[in-house]
Image: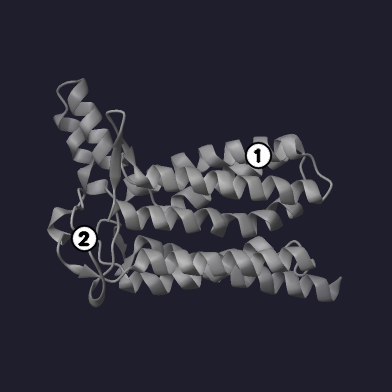
Amino acid sequence: MFPSFVLFGREISMYAIAAVAGLLTAGFYFTKCIKKRGLDDIDATIFLLWVAIGIFFGGHILYALTQLDKFGYFLKIRNLQGFKMVVSVIFGGSVFYGGLFGGIVAGLITVKAKKLDLATYADVSASAAPLFHFFGRIGCFLSGCCYGIESRFGFAAQNNPYVPEVNGVTRFPVQLVEAGFNLVLFIVFYRLLKSGKCQGRLFILYLLSYSVIRFSLEFLRGDAVRGFVFGLSTSQFISAIIFVFSCFYLLGAKIQRKNG
């Protein structure tokens, strides 16, 4: 793992670099796709800025909800330094699904406010999202903020600053596997977008596909900090809900097309 490096006396997070690289790459791809479809790329840039804000706050808020047992720390705050420390503990992490939902809400509000083409923006987002997520998961692997189960195959962390007890233990590289799946999703949805197939349904298909991948890969995760609901990890619980919702949505859309 390579969580950070020092540049000009400042510590630079590899996760932050990966996230910025993902935002820039996915953002460039998104605006190009929007422009190819005859829509304004300035509107696309504004849309992305609001989505990025939604991703940031949504990811941290959902992480905080997995740390409910630590909210009592607020009662022990005695000064500003203590407040900063408690906030960093409770809101210091980020959960992908929180970022996804935050981005969706921000995106829908922006689309409605600026009267953008929802179907086109959703379809393009279906291929841009896994491209961004590909970089994010590489950042997770490098920083060591999440990790896989103990395994004979994998990598042993040597300088994990977040969970020192995992250092020296060979772990399955679940983050890199998920990054690989996201790259495959990007390629698949890029081709679907380019071919014009499944127009207006690509984002729901992306949610359906990713929910299956995430539910399965959670069994290979070794970090317990992400929280559990009814015996499932928070992300597995959300994945199950998304899967059911997506199936019903697609079924309803199919029935509507037949009747229409």
Nearer to us in this view, 130 or 110: 130
Residue 138 vertical position relative to residue 72 in the rendered view, above or below:
below
Q: Which residue is mark 1?
A: 47
Q: Which residue is mark 2?
A: 157
Image location (x, y in percent) of residue 120:
75, 53
Left or right placement of residue 190 versus residue 179 in this view = right
- Helix, strand or loop under label 2: loop
Q: Which residue is at the far front? A: 8
Left or right placement of residue 146 versus residue 178 in this view = left
Which residue is at 45% across, 39% downward? 57
Which quarter of the rendering shows the N terminus?
Answer: bottom left
Left or right placement of residue 38 versus residue 157 in this view = right
Which residue is at 81% across, 51% downward? 37
Left or right placement of residue 31 versus residue 77 in this view = right
Residue type, label 1? Phe
Residue 60 vertical position relative to residue 137 in the rendered view, above or below:
above
Which residue is at 84% across, 47% downward? 38
Image location (x, y in percent) of residue 98:
45, 50
Q: Quick one: label 2, few (<14), some, or many (20+) residues within 10 Å?
A: many
Is residue 245 in view from this perspective?
A: no
Q: Quick one: label 1, few (<14), some, or many (20+) residues within 10 Å?
A: many
Please tell me which of labels 2 and 1 falls first in the chain: 1
Which residue is at 18% across, 36% downward? 73
Residue type, label 2? Ala
In the figure, residue 257 lies in which quadrant? bottom right
- Helix, strand or loop under label 1: helix
Image location (x, y in percent) of residue 200:
74, 61
Nearer to us in this view, 14 or 106: 14
Nearer to us in this view, 23 or 248: 23
Which quarter of the rendering shows the C terminus?
Answer: bottom right
Image location (x, y in percent) of residue 62:
39, 48
